[in-house]
Amino acid sequence: MPGPRAAEVTLSAEEQAALEQLVRRHTTPQQIALRARIILAAAQGQTNNAIHAEQRVTVNTVRSWRKRWVTLQSIALADLSAEERLTDAPRPGAPCRITADQRCQIEALACQQPEEHARPITHWTAREIADEIIHQGIVKSISPRHAARLLKRCPN
């Protein structure tokens, strides 16, 4: 007895072109390109088993992305691009303990000279910047390693 039928994928010309562009573009992350190939194959009428064998992914992966694409098709491509439809959904996790405003204050502090804050050093170290962040009351506690990581991520 066969299982439930796979969700039928029909693509508009605009969606087809967007997916093909994602597959051809050299800067597309491979994960997104793979998902685009899965959707294109599904639109050609291939079964989940055929796609899984061709793309070397599990049947559950094919089933999930096929279902997700069909679910998101009701949203216009102008509002939610093909690439955005194929990206991972946000995952649950602990909320950020440092707000964007606090990050801005930390970055501003890092741009100042340590001498301006009565620190007898010429350059900020992770320990010194963490101590100053706590001293100024930007956050209640922060490890030197975390302070260094926050500043390393700065797009300067």
Image (spheres, grey):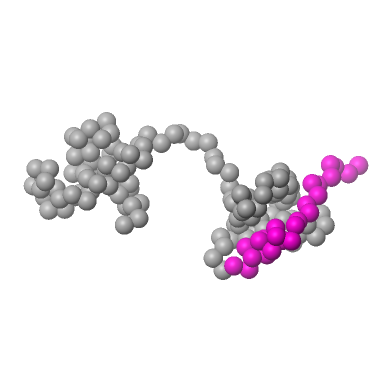
Total labels drawn? 0
User: For this view, does 153 lie left or right of residue 1?
Assistant: left
One can see residue 125 in this view: yes
Q: Residue at x 67, y 60 (%)?
A: 19
Asked if residue 109 is positioned above or below residue 21 in the image, the reply reads above
User: For this view, does 107 lie left or right of residue 51?
Assistant: left
Q: Residue at x 18, y 49 (%)?
A: 112
Magenta stretch: give its range. Answer: 1-25
Q: Residue at x 31, y 57 (%)?
A: 156
* In front of the other: 4 or 40: 40
Residue 141 spot, x, y in % from top left: 27, 33
Residue 111 spot, x, y in % from top left: 22, 51
Residue 73 spot, x, y in % from top left: 71, 48
One can see residue 49 in this view: no
Asked if residue 103 is positioned above or below residue 16 in the image, the reply reads above
* In front of the other: 79 or 55: 79
The N terminus sits in image quarter: top right
* In front of the other: 106 or 149: 106
User: Residue 41: which quarter of the image?
Assistant: bottom right
Toward the top, the furthest residue is 140
* In front of the other: 89 or 148: 89
Q: Residue at x 23, y 38 (%)?
A: 133
Residue 138 spot, x, y in % from top left: 26, 35
Q: Is 14 part of what is drawn in magenta?
A: yes
